[in-house]
């Protein structure tokens, strides 16, 4: 439901009541849960184990749903086969074991109209959880077993427990259901008790959002929002409360991103590269510069999207501020060519370029690709007899031999090496640049902000006087498409460019979800026919070696099976991340050259591997992979004009797994798949679970809250434009600081 369509009945009751005089979130964070009368010492320990130590932690532990007590079904009204929600009290429990040692727990529950039995097999802990007098919310299907009305394995929420024998009346109430922790021994009714006391004692809350913005977006005051989400009086109350609290979460995050961007602009100056957007326009004097010669010498025409991306990048690089740009593109859209053009733009002005990749295999692939694209190009070198020398490209990983590493490090420091491709090895202290002008970070989601900043800092030049620095330009690439709204949260401090056009001549990929033995047999036959035609194939497995804990095909065992049986007679190779670097390189070279016809691999080939002759990829146990992984693995084929196929083997394990396979079979549009992935798996898909928590996004669901992301960005930019250091918004400043470590806080607010 969109924010506009949700009920807004409670938005105007006290919309302007909150103010700076109320209790601040920082104050609530300083109050331990142990100060609450209802929280006994053992429960305080359980809460701490669950990550709740302060009153603020407690108040931001939000209900996951609500029970409308007037809408639950009565036991007597249920017919066999009905699925329903029943609010009932536990009358008795008993545990029964059969002669083979297997047990079941039978729980008798009742309401004012009748009773029924809940049955749980092999869950002995239910007897302790559902003690006599407990009030429960039960959801399940009513069945008849030997004349008994029962629900087998229903979903049960423990709502309240009667300790004194008197049943607390909850008729005509909206009851919040909180996430419980069986491990920590915490139930929903206990959390509700603690929250109720915390709300009563907290009193009015300070509201940092200016009144004009609250009125414009029809937002509740903070006090009303926090109370309504925990103790709604009407079914409609939680929606506007949730909108206000989601907006608060997003506003704090967007303020950090806007402030980070402003701080970088305030503290850094650009190199002002000698490059122009005209250098990639048709008829724009190609050949006159290094970039022009690069574009003119390509064995293919740049797509319109590639030209537009390079034009934006070159405009940034020629400007007065360091570039901070995100380059998004679908699988096979040609982002690498854009990255090479970016680094060459730095090289043609006498600077250097660096590309950092997350894995050795991907770094090696990039090195081969960049070296091939730069082949034949020369750079002006006044110190060299004749004036020119070939563009120098190097590879630096932790597996590079010591002698080769010493040469590369020396040439980077002297300026003899123009472009270096590497992994985290680029971040080591001994790697220094003569003049690093452009940094490209590939697969940004696998690096932290600190890592990309660390590489960028290697090109930083401190200037005397005002303390400003000259920083290299930064291009962040991601091969995993991210929905625009999510990108605003993850990469909100970067300008965004999308390469949304495939190079001409690419044949479409036919995707088949092989649900049965006949379809699987067709996949192996397709590999044989394609190899017979001189092409190559991948087989991808979720595991390296067989596991007792996970039932899935492993690369090692599958390589042996396919070589001996299914694909006997073909040259089948094996590649996974645990192989020594030299062996991995040897295997990949053999596959590229055709010495190997089929490559059995793990997800080590997920990104960056470019073998145009590969026309078939078979993904085994495909339901164990995420949508983004499946889309990337499919992208290992279809990299030429040859028709290509992707077979997804497996399914039937989980509803979500089948939904992922169906989506990948239905479309090859990576951005559409990213939206589906976001809907199925939530924010962890694009933010990563750690970043979701550290960003303070507890309520926000990006797919549902698109409008609030954009509104929060608008408000953040408006506030920072008028008040760059938030001097006039002290409560908001305090809340923003709470999400930052000290180093980042000092950087953003160093004035």
Image (cartoon, grey):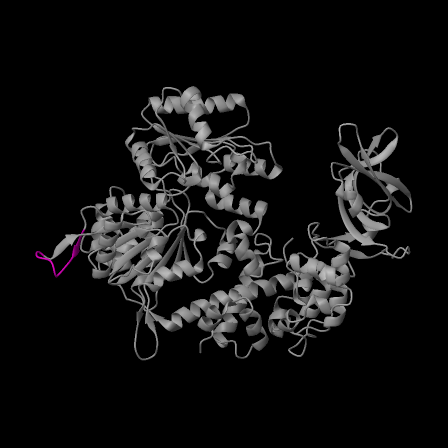
Residue beneath the point at 28% across and 53% down: 420
Residue at point 45% right, 28% down? 558
Q: In the figure, 433 relative to 548: above or below?
A: below
Q: Residue furthest left?
A: 385
Assess whether residue 380 is covered by the magenta stretch.
yes
Q: Is residue 639 above or below residue 227?
A: above
Place of residue 349 in the rendered image (x, y in percent of width and height, measured from the top left): 22, 61
Q: Is residue 647 magenta?
A: no
Question: Which of the 4 image quarters holds residue 207?
Answer: bottom right
Stretch of the chain drawn in magenta: 378-386
Q: Residue at x 75, y 38 (%)?
A: 153
> Left or right: where does residue 660 sit relative to residue 364?
right
Quarter in which the C terminus is drawn: bottom left
Corner quadrant of residue 599: top left
Query: Left or right: where does residue 109 sit relative to residue 716?
Result: right
- Vertically, is 570 above or below 496? above
Observer-nearest residue: 569 or 176? 569
Residue at 47% in and 67% down: 258
């Amino acid at each position: 439901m969109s924010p506009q369509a949700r009920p807004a009945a409670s938005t105007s009751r006290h919309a302007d009541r909150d103010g700076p005089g109320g209790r601040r979130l920082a104050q609530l964070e300083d109050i331990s849960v142990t100060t609450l009368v209802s929280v006994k010492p053992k429960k305080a320990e359980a809460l701490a184990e669950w990550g709740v130590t302060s009153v603020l932690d407690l108040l931001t532990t939000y209900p996951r749903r609500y029970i409308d007590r007037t809408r639950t079904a009565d036991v007597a009204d249920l017919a066999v086969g009905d699925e329903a929600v029943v609010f009932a009290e536990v009358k008795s429990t008993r545990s029964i074991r059969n002669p083979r040692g297997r047990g079941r727990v039978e729980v008798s529950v009742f309401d004012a109209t009748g009773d029924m039995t809940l049955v749980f097999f092999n869950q002995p802990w239910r007897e302790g959880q559902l003690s006599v007098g407990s009030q429960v919310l039960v959801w399940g299907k009513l069945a008849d077993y030997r004349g008994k009305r029962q629900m087998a394995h229903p979903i049960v929420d423990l709502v309240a427990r009667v300790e004194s024998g008197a049943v607390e009346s909850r008729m005509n109430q909206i009851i919040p259901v909180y996430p419980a922790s069986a491990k920590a021994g915490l139930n929903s009714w206990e959390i509700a008790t603690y929250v109720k006391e915390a709300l009563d004692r907290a009193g009015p809350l300070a509201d940092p959002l200016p009144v004009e913005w609250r009125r414009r977006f029809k937002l509740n005051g903070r006090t009303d929002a926090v109370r309504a989400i925990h103790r709604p009086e009407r079914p409609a109350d939680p929606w506007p409360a949730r909108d206000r609290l989601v907006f608060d979460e997003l506003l704090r995050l967007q303020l950090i991103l806007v402030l980070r961007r402003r701080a970088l602009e305030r503290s850094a100056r650009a190199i002002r590269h000698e490059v122009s957007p005209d250098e990639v326009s048709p008829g724009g004097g190609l050949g006159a510069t290094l970039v022009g010669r690069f574009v003119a010498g390509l064995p293919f025409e740049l797509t319109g999207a590639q030209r537009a991306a390079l034009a934006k990048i070159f405009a940034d690089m020629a400007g007065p501020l360091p570039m901070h740009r995100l380059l998004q593109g679908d699988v096979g859209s040609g982002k690498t060519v854009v990255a090479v053009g970016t680094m060459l733009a730095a090289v043609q002005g006498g600077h250097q370029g660096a590309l950092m990749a997350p894995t050795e295999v991907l770094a090696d692939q990039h090195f081969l690709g960049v070296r091939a694209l730069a082949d034949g190009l020369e750079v002006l070198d006044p110190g060299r007899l004749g004036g020119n020398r070939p563009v120098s490209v190097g590879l630096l990983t932790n597996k590079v031999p010591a002698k080769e590493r010493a040469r590369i490090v020396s040439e980077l420091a002297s300026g003899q090496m123009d472009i270096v491709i590497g992994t985290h090895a680029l971040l080591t202290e001994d790697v220094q640049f003569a003049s690093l002008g452009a940094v490209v970070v590939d697969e940004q989601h696998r690096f932290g902000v600190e890592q990309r900043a660390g590489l960028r800092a290697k090109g930083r030049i401190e200037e005397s006087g005002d303390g400003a620095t000259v920083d290299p330009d930064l291009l962040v690439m991601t091969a995993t498409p991210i929905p625009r709204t999510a990108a605003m949260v993850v990469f909100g401090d970067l300008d965004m460019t999308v390469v949304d056009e495939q190079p001409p001549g690419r044949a479409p990929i036919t995707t088949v979800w092989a649900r049965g033995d006949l379809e699987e047999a067709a996949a192996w036959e397709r590999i044989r026919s394609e190899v017979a035609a001189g092409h190559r194939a991948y087989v991808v497995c979720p595991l390296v070696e067989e596991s007792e804990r996970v039932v899935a095909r492993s690369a090692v065992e599958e390589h042996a099976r396919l070589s001996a049986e299914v694909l006997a007679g073909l040259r089948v190779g094996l590649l996974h991340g645990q192989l020594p670097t030299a062996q991995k390189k040897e295997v990949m070279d053999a596959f590229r050259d055709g010495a190997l016809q089929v490559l059995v691999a793990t997800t080590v080939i997920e990104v960056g591997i470019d073998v145009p002759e590969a026309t078939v990829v078979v993904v085994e146990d495909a339901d164990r992979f995420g949508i983004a992984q499946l889309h990337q693995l499919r992208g290992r084929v279809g990299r030429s004009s040859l028709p290509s196929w992707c077979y997804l083997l497996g399914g039937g394990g989980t509803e979500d797994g089948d939904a992922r396979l169906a989506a990948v079979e239905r479309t090859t549009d990576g951005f559409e798949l990213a939206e589906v992935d976001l809907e199925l798996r939530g924010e962890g898909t694009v933010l990563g679970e750690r970043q979701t928590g550290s960003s303070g996004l507890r309520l926000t669901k990006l797919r549902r809250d698109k409008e609030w992301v954009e509104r929060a960005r608008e408000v953040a930019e408006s506030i920072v434009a008028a008040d760059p250091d938030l001097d006039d918004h002290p409560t908001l400043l305090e809340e923003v600081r709470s999400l930052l470590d000290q180093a980042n806080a000092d950087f953003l607010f160093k004035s």
